[in-house]
Amino acid sequence: MTAEVEVAVVTTVSGRREHLANQRRGLEAGIRPPDLHVVVAMGDPGVRVLLGDERACHVIDVPVASLLPLAAARNAGARAALRAGARTLVFLDVDCIPSATLVARYASLAADPRHATSILCGQVSYLPPAPSGDYDLDRLRDLAPPHPGRPALADDDVRRTDAYHLFWSLSFAMSAQAWATVGGFCEDYAGYGGEDTDFGQSAKAVGVDMCWVGGAAAYHQHHPVSDPPFEHLVEILENARVFAARWGWWPMAGWLSAFEEAGLIELDETGTSWVRRR
């Protein structure tokens, strides 16, 4: 680890080696590389082999029983970064390549007293499949428009939002103080779905602001997806049940409706809880 750590990036990974390599390229090419990159390998010992000699890169291992422990892995990464002295935590999904200004922009805002107690959420754009020879970091903005479900801000803009239900962990940053106030991700969730929405609600409950941030763009690399994700039905349903017990309403409504239309789930006899259809 580096002797002085002001800003740490936390990435969880299982597989996706090429995506991780591209993320590393983006971080190293930034105008302000992180002082430390904590890579949390979820049941993937090959990550340590891949990154063992990289500058300012620290790999920790989190075992996997069956489903990926995404919430627990992010918390473990944050703990490692904080132990190293990090004052700003930047969370970046392994599929995301940071823009050249992402780390610098997040670090500047997290150190600003006006935003030091906020969740800072940068713009995420979805890239097409990589061309031959991989993505050109200088052309990423030209390849992917901003996600339509989030505001596209000018590079110097910050906008507070009450849409905590739109929080996602693909790209966000917080001061160590704000992270401690929220308390991290709830580890009752395992596998796909729910833990991001829960984190947003936890932040809302303790009065931590959430802000959309311009100038901290991330570019999500292409990979095949299914919509709705039928292969994750069991874990989505269980995670939605955990969330409903904690917050009193059911998240991931679009997916649950799609599962119902496909005849896979139904409301129970009380009409208040989703269950698998017999």
Image (cartoon, helix red, strand yellow):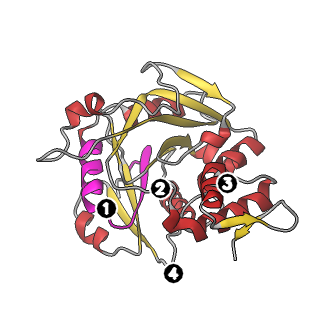
Snapshot quadrant of residue 115 = top right
Q: Which residue is mark 4?
A: 65
- Name which residue type carries label 3: Gly
- Residue at horizontal 47 percent and vertical 77 percent from the top: 63
* Res 174 quadrant in image: top right
- Crowd rating for badge 4 (residues with CA inside 10 Å; few <14, some 14–19, many 20+): few
Spatial CA distance of label 2 from label 3 is: 15 Å
The magenta-colored residue range is 4-28
Query: Which mark is nearer the camera, 2 or 1?
Result: 1
Residue at the disc numbered 2: 81
Give yes or no for residue 273 being in the magenta stretch: no
In front: 60, or 154?
154
Residue at numbered disc 1:
16
Q: CA distance from mark 4 to mark 3?
A: 24 Å
182 lies above or below 120: below
Residue 25 percent across, percent down from the top left: 23, 46
